[in-house]
Image (cartoon, grey):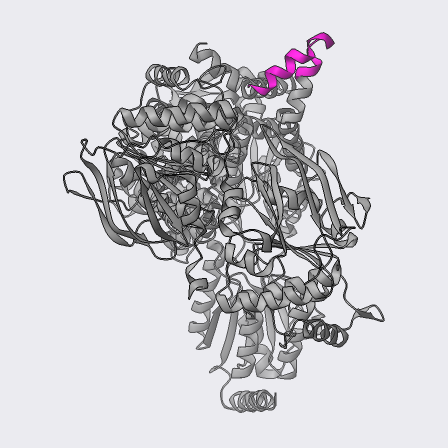
């Protein structure tokens, strides 16, 4: 069987979900697919989905790796706020673009290191360990911005939010490249398999000689790094670091993206591409709601109902049922065999 | 002492059968318990002790057989139901609520009420009254965790007896008690016996069995080996029953004393870890199979874990054949030194259930090479297919998740994982436990092949016949000490049983 | 218990002594919610400035968003025998007993910026802005600015269900009522944040023919307006010209935008709540003049004619 075939069999439910949602939006809003170029930048609703989805997509990359090890990282939203604040502070303090980015990314790595040490060395449960930074992180960010929205006008930094490369908005370029790079690193090296092994059975992996401690720290650092990229983009987008609101609740969207992407919260097998599609699904729902013109009181309900439908359709029970109804009764025995070996 | 073979047993299990996917945990086991007797239930890991208990108390639904209480068939739906029938259980880890008071724990769920309110005064008085029967005069208003484990055990027993009152099952009650506390517990058990309760006592301390139990029942691989009156059996017979012969014909040692021509491969001196295994000396030749015999909890698995760095040694040192010191602080260190380890509990410590056979086989080698240099899919597949063929692993293909294979095939995958790393020293903990007869023989043959190829092996097994068949040397472990070493023609099941059955130290003192 | 009473008694005595000696050498306790927003930080700064100007010794307590901290602070102020207490309550309920304690100790309490659910004889007065009025001022500006021209307005609401969002929406709608040339075509929440303001504005622009259909934006706060201005620029339109921008709060950043011609008007929610509070207090301590139970602060309208850069310079160091 070809690798590509396996790949598509893995992510077709996510792609189908995305297609259905985009289809629904375009029925309600016929101008959806109009794409033009404004100010040398691609412009249109599909671009908005890709562009606005950047923070959650980036967070989902790190979150997928963490969840694959049977962990979870609740701190990513707060880490976004910290790194956004660091970048705004660095640029307004006159450190120059290179140094500022370096500081922001280092801050993300440091946050990841902290989480990783709590989880891998002290053995604190991931949900508790990362809760600490989730709560404290915004406070740290507020200390950096001194409670206000720290604004800047440095064109170099703004480029990461509203610039474009070959007409493609920079945030889109960043998350697509990051996704591709991480996928490549994880699948071309043995990291992917080792991470999955840790997620399925930590003790057995340790006994097989896998350096579980270092790997666990590494995935939390990767998550911190992704969060810092998202934080820089979010700050650059509004030309200011908003410690109170940057990345607020986005950790939950990131977890949801991973779940929609079909990676189990119990760890093990993961797919980065599917998580990225999951992030786009979430953003497509958000953008669709905004385009629909419904009163804002309905936003959360509409979103919840759509997510509920997606998750129910993806549930194991429903999959069995779908396969069952899609075959004629004589084929049932055959079907059952197929569901055992996904 | 009450008569143990009463005509009408209090509790009787007939032909109890329990099947888990891939294994028969209980295969038509009979068991009977008389009123006023203490009845030991014995067996190694996986013999079926806990499965039998769980069937008796309704924690598992049995697949066959019947359970009679006072001659009437019962079918408890769960532990609470069993309690209502009169069967109470106390586990090794007391599962009461540590932060409630002693009195609250004793009457939890049955608090005396007054005008719909819990009457603390009556509850405390009741608790004092109950505990006085057990010779315990303690402050019942203090929380449970302010007392020692032994006192907590007695409180748990008191609660179980109050709630059920016919049958009391004690699952390894003495595992974490010291000698004096064991005495206290035994006094309680004796007085309950005099009150006519039937007591099932599970322990792997042979001395305690001989001191407190009237009869004993031995299980092995899910089957009943036999029920005996304790006074009519000696320690050697008992160990024989527990570790007894699987094969019909007498197995003779190959009688070869290892030539030693391969030279010393590893030597450990004063190697040990406090609380796990006392310091021991061990020298292993190239191409030698060293067997380790001992009962459950004797320190046999602990020996393997200290050697492999799972629980790193805190005394002694290890050197290789050239006398170079080896660092064995972690499994990674041990693997770097050319070690491999197939642990006893395959499910939790061995296989990565959701990953494929291919990935499971490649895992240890990949971990040793490092994450940067990935073994390509093609190489992994070739490696896996090679060992699927060599070890006859029954799987449709290398991509099947290893968790879906049978126990024997999982064991072979574990072996393959280490064999691809080409280890110089392989530790196997119970390599033949829970696998079918055919796979059993194949694994024994494999052990012999490996040692002729020059690999050194340390094999832990409760199958004494097996040890006789392939070991050049056998170390007997008892009470966390390496107590005997048998070589050549001295390696016989009788000799091993005798060494294992020798009285424990504290009993001698 | 006894000692508390003694201290309270001493406090009352002390305050009476002080009353007789000097009206201006007062001690005032200020229990602030925290510093969750720039506006709140500016309010703290201005309160301290105002106290300094009047020679008042201000005792400041930051409650970090917790009512229990505020109650503790109030009790400590009472124990210290301050002359008056300023309270910016974090929630509306649960103040009765501590306010009664202050009343018993004869210490007047003035509420800043937010109200409480307690009976109004438990506090001297409340200083605050009228949220409906703010929306009204913004709407009135738009009505006057358009002078009868047709205009489609999009609205960026505050957090759904919050009282500023409800009141500022109502005030605006009252002002444009009866002016059929103005139509509110889209209204969506931007959660009071720049990010959401920008994102929602982007979708408005797409939904309304690339923005050609929109003539004005009304945002419930300046932060959302600042985000929306960026979205309008990125869509290739000129905020302030192609799309008029009116918002509320008057934070420094909107004046920069106004100076650049990208925003048209903002309604001030003044952080100077302490000024009117101190004035009322001074009158009360001098001759017992009872202030009204609610002192409404001015909702001042700023446009490009108000020298936005100068206002920006004044405001930028207040801690916004």
Q: Is residue A224 left or right of residue A292?
A: left
State the residue at coordinates (54%, 83%).
C79
Percent x, y for residue B90? 63, 56
* In the rendered image, the vertical position of residue B359 relative to residue B378, given as above or below: below
> Any magenta on residue A339?
yes
State the residue at coordinates (44%, 42%).
A76
> Any magenta on residue A176?
no
Percent x, y for residue B387? 38, 19
Answer whether residue C236 is visible to the viewer in this image: no
State the residue at coordinates (44%, 68%).
C48
Residue extending furthest right?
A: B115
Q: Is residue A174 left or right of residue A268?
A: left
Percent x, y for residue C232? 48, 30
Q: Nearer the viewer, residue C309 or B450?
A: B450
* In the rendered image, the vertical position of residue A102 relative to residue B96, given as above or below: above
Q: In which quarter of the view is residue C103 placed?
A: bottom right
Which quarter of the rendered picture does the N terminus of chain C lie within? Answer: bottom right
Q: Nearer the viewer, residue A275 or A207?
A: A207
Which quarter of the rendered picture does the C terminus of chain C lie within? Answer: bottom left
Magenta range: A323-342
Percent x, y for residue A342? 55, 19
Question: Is the stretch drawn in magenta largely helix, strand or loop?
Answer: helix
Answer whether residue A76 is visible to the viewer in this image: yes
Q: Nearer the viewer, residue B372 or B91?
A: B91
């Amino acid at each position: 069987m070809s690798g590509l075939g396996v790949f598509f069999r893995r992510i077709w439910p996510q792609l189908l979900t995305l297609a259905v949602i985009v289809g629904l939006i375009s029925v309600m809003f016929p101008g959806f697919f109009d794409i033009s170029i404004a100010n040398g930048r691609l412009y249109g609703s599909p671009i908005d989905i890709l562009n606005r989805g950047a923070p959650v997509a980036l967070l989902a990359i790190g979150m997928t790796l963490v969840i694959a090890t049977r962990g979870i990282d609740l701190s990513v939203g707060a880490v976004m706020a910290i790194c956004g604040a660091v970048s705004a502070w660095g640029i307004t303090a006159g450190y120059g673009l290179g140094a500022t980015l370096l500081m922001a990314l280092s801050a993300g790595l440091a946050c990841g290191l902290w989480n990783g040490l709590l989880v891998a060395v002290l053995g604190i449960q991931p949900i508790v360990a990362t809760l600490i930074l989730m709560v404290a992180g915004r406070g740290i960010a507020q200390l950096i911005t001194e409670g206000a929205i720290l604004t800047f006008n440095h064109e170099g930094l703004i480029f990461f939010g509203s610039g474009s490369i070959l007409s493609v908005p920079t945030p889109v370029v960043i998350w697509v490249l990051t996704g591709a790079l991480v996928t490549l690193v994880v699948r071309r090296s043995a990291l992917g398999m080792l991470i999955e092994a840790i997620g399925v059975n930590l003790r057995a992996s340790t006994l097989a000689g896998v350096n579980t401690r270092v790997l666990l720290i590494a995935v939390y650092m990767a998550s911190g790094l992704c969060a810092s990229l998202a934080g820089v983009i979010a700050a650059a987008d509004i030309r200011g670091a908003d410690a109170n609101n940057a990345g607020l609740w986005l950790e939950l969207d990131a977890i949801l993206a991973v779940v929609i992407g079909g990676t189990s919260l119990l760890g093990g097998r993961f797919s980065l591409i599917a998580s990225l599609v999951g992030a786009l699904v979430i953003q497509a729902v958000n953008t669709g709601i905004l385009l629909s013109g419904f009163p804002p009181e309905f936003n959360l309900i509409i979103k919840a109902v759509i997510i509920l439908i997606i998750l129910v359709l993806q549930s194991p029970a429903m999959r069995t049922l779908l396969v069952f109804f899609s075959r004629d009764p004589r084929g049932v025995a055959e079907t059952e065999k197929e569901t055992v070996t996904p | 002492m009450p008569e143990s073979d009463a005509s009408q047993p209090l509790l009787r299990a007939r032909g109890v059968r329990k099947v888990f996917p891939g294994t028969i945990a209980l295969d038509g086991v009979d068991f009977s318990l008389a009123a006023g007797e203490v009845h030991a239930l014995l067996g190694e890991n996986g013999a079926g002790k806990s499965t039998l208990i769980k069937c008796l108390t309704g924690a598992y639904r049995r697949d066959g057989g019947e359970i009679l209480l006072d001659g009437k068939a019962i079918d408890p739906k769960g532990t609470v139901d069993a309690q209502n029938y009169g069967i109470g259980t106390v586990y090794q880890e007391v599962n009461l609520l540590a932060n409630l008071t002693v009195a609250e724990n004793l009457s939890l769920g049955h608090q005396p009420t007054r005008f719909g309110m819990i009457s603390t005064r009556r509850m405390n008085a009741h608790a004092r009254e109950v505990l006085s029967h057990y010779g315990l005069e303690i402050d019942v208003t203090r929380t449970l965790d302010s007392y020692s484990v032994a006192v907590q055990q007695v409180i748990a027993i008191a609660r179980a007896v109050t709630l059920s009152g016919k049958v009391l099952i004690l699952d390894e009650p003495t595992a974490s008690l010291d000698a004096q506390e064991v005495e206290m517990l035994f006094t309680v058990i004796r007085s309950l016996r005099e009150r006519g309760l039937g007591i099932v006592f599970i322990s792997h301390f042979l001395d305690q069995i001989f001191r407190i139990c009237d009869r004993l029942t031995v299980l092995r691989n899910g089957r009943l080996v036999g029920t005996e009156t304790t006074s009519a059996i000696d320690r050697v017979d008992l160990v024989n029953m527990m570790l007894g012969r699987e094969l019909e014909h007498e197995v003779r040692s190959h009688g070869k004393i290892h030539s030693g021509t391969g030279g010393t491969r590893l030597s450990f001196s004063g190697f040990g870890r406090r609380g796990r295994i006392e310091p021991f000396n061990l020298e292993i030749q190239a191409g030698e199979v060293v067997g380790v015999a001992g009962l459950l909890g004797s320190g046999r698995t602990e020996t393997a874990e200290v050697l492999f760095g799972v629980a790193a040694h805190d005394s002694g040192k290890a050197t290789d054949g050239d006398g170079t010191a080896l660092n064995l602080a972690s499994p990674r260190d041990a693997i770097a030194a050319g070690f491999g380890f197939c642990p006893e509990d395959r499910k939790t410590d061995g296989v990565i259930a959701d990953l494929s056979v291919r990935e499971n086989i490649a895992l240890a080698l990949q971990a040793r090479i490092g994450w940067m240099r990935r073994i390509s899919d093609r190489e992994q597949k070739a490696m896996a297919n090679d060992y699927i063929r060599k070890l006859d692993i029954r799987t449709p293909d290398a991509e099947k998740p290893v968790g879906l294979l049978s126990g024997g095939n999982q064991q072979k995958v574990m072996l393959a994982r280490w064999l691809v790393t080409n280890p110089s020293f392989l530790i196997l903990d119970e390599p033949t436990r829970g696998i079918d007869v055919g796979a059993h023989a194949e694994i024994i043959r494999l052990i012999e092949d490996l040692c002729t190829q020059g690999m050194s092996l340390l094999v832990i097994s409760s199958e004494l016949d097996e040890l006789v068949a392939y070991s050049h040397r056998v170390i007997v472990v008892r009470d966390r000490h390496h107590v005997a070493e048998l070589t050549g023609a001295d390696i016989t099941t009788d000799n091993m049983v005798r060494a294992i059955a020798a009285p424990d130290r504290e009993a001698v003192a | 218990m006894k000692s508390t009473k003694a201290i309270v008694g001493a406090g009352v005595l002390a305050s009476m002594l002080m009353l007789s000696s000097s009206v201006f050498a007062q001690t005032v306790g200020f229990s602030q919610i925290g510093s969750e927003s720039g506006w709140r930080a500016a309010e703290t700064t201005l309160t301290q400035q105002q106290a300094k100007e009047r020679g008042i010794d201000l005792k400041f307590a930051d409650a970090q968003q917790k009512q229990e901290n505020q109650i503790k602070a109030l009790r400590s102020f009472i124990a210290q025998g301050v002359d008056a207490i300023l309270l910016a309550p974090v929630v509306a309920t649960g103040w009765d007993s501590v306010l009664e304690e202050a009343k018993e100790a004869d210490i007047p309490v003035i509420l800043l910026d937010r109200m409480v659910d307690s009976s109004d004889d438990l506090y001297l007065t409340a200083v605050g802005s009228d949220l409906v009025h703010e929306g009204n001022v913004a709407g009135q500006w738009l009505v006057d600015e358009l002078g009868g021209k047709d205009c489609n307005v999009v609205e960026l609401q505050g957090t759904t269900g919050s009282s500023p969002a409800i009141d500022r929406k109502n005030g605006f709608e009252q002002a444009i009522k009866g002016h059929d040339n103005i139509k509110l075509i889209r209204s969506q929440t931007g959660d009071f944040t720049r990010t959401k303001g920008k994102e929602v504005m982007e979708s408005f622009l797409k939904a309304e023919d690339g923005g050609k259909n929109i003539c004005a934006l009304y945002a419930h706060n300046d932060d959302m307006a600042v985000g929306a201005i960026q979205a309008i620029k990125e869509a290739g339109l000129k905020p302030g010209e192609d799309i008029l921008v009116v918002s509320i709060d008057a934070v420094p950043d909107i004046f920069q935008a106004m100076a650049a011609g990208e925003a048209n008007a903002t309604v001030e929610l003044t952080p100077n709540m302490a000024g009117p509070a101190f004035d009322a207090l001074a009158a009360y301590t001098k001759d017992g003049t009872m202030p009204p139970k609610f002192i409404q602060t001015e909702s001042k309208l700023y446009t490009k004619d108000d020298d936005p850069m100068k206002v920006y310079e004044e405001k930028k160091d207040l801690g916004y």
